[in-house]
Amino acid sequence: MYLSGYRCMWVLAMFDLPMDDREARKRYARFRKALIKDGFNRLQYSVYARCCASRENADVHERRVEAAVPIDGEVRTMQVTDKQFERMQVFWGGMRQTTEQPPEQLTLF
């Protein structure tokens, strides 16, 4: 089923992971790849976001983030509504940029 104009719940993952040695860089890479595999997109260097169909679905993805956190890392997640996400202002070189948009269509199984 496809829903056009569907409103979603956004999950933001913000992290600070050490990269001071080879093993730490590997843990960083594994964590980042886990986020991408789970459908997160990069907003900034250590900030990723994912659009979810519901609050319950967002909770599932937060648990997946939690399971992937390296032992020596700090990760914060936050859920925001589509409306709150739309109100985000993005500045790049002093010029206003548009925010990321949710998918045009959402597939429900």
Image (cartoon, rainbow, N blue to C red):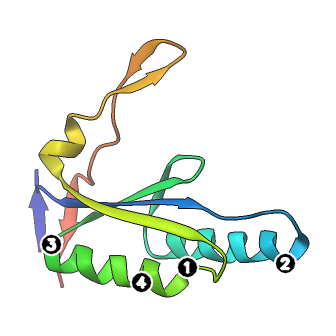
Question: Disc 1 residue type?
Answer: Val
Residue 20 got which mark? none
CA distance for labels 2 and 4: 22 Å
| Disc with the residue nearer the chain's start (2 vs 4) | 2
The C terminus: image quadrant: bottom left
Of residues 60 and 4, the one nearer the viewer is 60
The N terminus: image quadrant: bottom left
Question: Disc 4 residue type?
Answer: Arg
CA distance for labels 2 and 3: 35 Å
Secondary structure of the residue carrying numbered label 1: loop
CA distance for labels 1 and 4: 9 Å
CA distance for labels 3 and 4: 14 Å
- Left or right of 38? Residue 74 is right
Secondary structure of the residue carrying numbered label 3: helix
To which residue does mark 3 refer? Answer: 55
| Disc with the residue nearer the chain's start (3 vs 4) | 3
To which residue does mark 4 refer? Answer: 64
**Tags 1 and 3 touching, CB below 8 Å:** no
Secondary structure of the residue carrying numbered label 2: helix
Of residues 45 and 33, the one nearer the viewer is 45
